[in-house]
Amino acid sequence: MCGLAEYLERRNSIVRFLEEDIGSGDITSSSIVPSNKIISAVILCNDLNETITCGLHDAQIVFDVCNCWANPLMNDGSNVKKGDVVMQIRGEARSVLKAERTALNLIMRMSGIATLTRRFVNLVEGYNPKVRIAGTRKTAPGLRAFDKKAIATGGGYPHRMRLDEMVMIKDNHLAVTDSIEYSIRTARTNIGSAVRIECEVRNTEEAIRAAKAGANVIMLDNFTPSEAESCAKAIREFGTFDDIEIELSGGITLSNVVDYMKAQPDLISVGQLTHSPTAVDYSLEIVKTFDRQEL
């Protein structure tokens, strides 16, 4: 469940999605579908693999905005297989058809993100259940709140939603500043002690410098598994650095994530979760049609 402000923000986003899709009107449905036609329909999963469903309540908002009744039959995070019905819909045929694509797009994308996240989580949990699989800001513009919700549904850690949430010093920041030490200390002076500072590093020497300068989180970017293990060990050998979190990022996939567990990271960020998820196949199927006078 979300608060009222979050709900209204999400609803406003969905209104914009519908406006983008509908334009001045659905000329196909308006020209051939009788205005008095009422339909009942379902949304069902057609995917051959077992997946995690997500976005049902967002799709419900889509139908609500279009003056249709929609009832999710499962909760976000449920395991779904081919043939499972996840939602019932009823309303004017023109309205249901107007909402169909936007609703399905959200369910398909969010379910794909949640499913992929769960696969990563399941792989690392067997080695260390405390390790968090995190998303990144590599999201489609306009969809970040939905993508991050899907990551959380899959058991992952959404990480930064916006640039104002924490200081994250990356390679391009360092390219225009004096040094790692200068960047971390200047950021701490300017933003105070309440905001966490993360610094991306390319090797062990930079990692130690970042730790000594006061970084809260050190991101080992594009390290091999053996390099990550060696660097993480070097960071932890300094007793005063026990409270520093280690994040791994760059080139981590389902096929190699287990290899990175030897580094004992606190966090593994995976851009793939949102920049290239495979959509889960869902469709809307009409079950019955009525004329308005029959009701």
Image: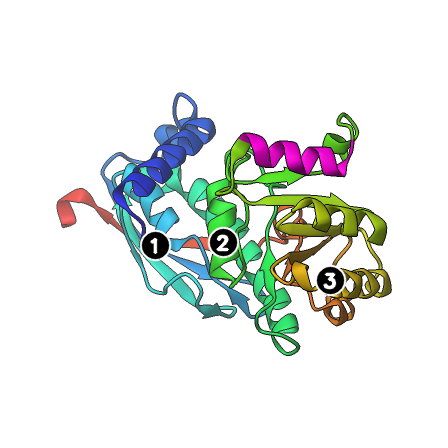
> Which residue in the protein does label 3 denote?
238
Q: Does the magenta stretch include residue 186?
A: yes
Confirm whether residue 203 shows in the render.
Answer: no
Residue at position x 41%, y 61% in the image: 76
User: What is the quadrant of residue 293 in the picture?
Assistant: top left
Q: What residue type is labelled 3?
A: Phe
How far apart, in angstroms, are the residues tagged by discs 2 and 1? 25 Å
Q: What residue type is labelled 1?
A: Ala
In the picture, measured across the screen, residue 125 lies left or right of residue 101, that is right
- The x and y percentages for residue 222 are 80, 51
Which numbered disc flags the more N-terminal residue, 2 or 1? 1
Confirm whether residue 201 shows in the render.
Answer: yes
Mark 2 against mark 1, which lies toward the viewer?
A: 2
Residue at position x 45%, y 57% in the image: 54
User: What is the quadrant of residue 116 in the picture?
Assistant: bottom right
Q: Which amino acid does label 2 sit on?
A: Ala
Mark 2 against mark 3, which lies toward the viewer?
A: 3
User: What is the quadrant of residue 88 in the picture?
Assistant: bottom left
Q: Which span of residues is magenta-colored? A: 179-190
Disc 2 residue crowd, few under 14, some 14–19, many 20+, Cα 10 Å: many
Q: Is 109 rendered above or below residue 130? A: above
> Which residue in the protein does label 2 denote?
150
User: Nearest the camera: 22 or 6?
Assistant: 6
Which dot marks residue 8?
none
Which dot marks residue 41?
1
Secondary structure mostly seen in magenta is: helix
User: Nearest the camera: 199 or 193?
Assistant: 193
Q: Is residue 133 magenta?
A: no
At numbered mark 1, what does the secondary structure look like: helix, strand or loop?
strand
- The x and y percentages for residue 173 are 72, 31
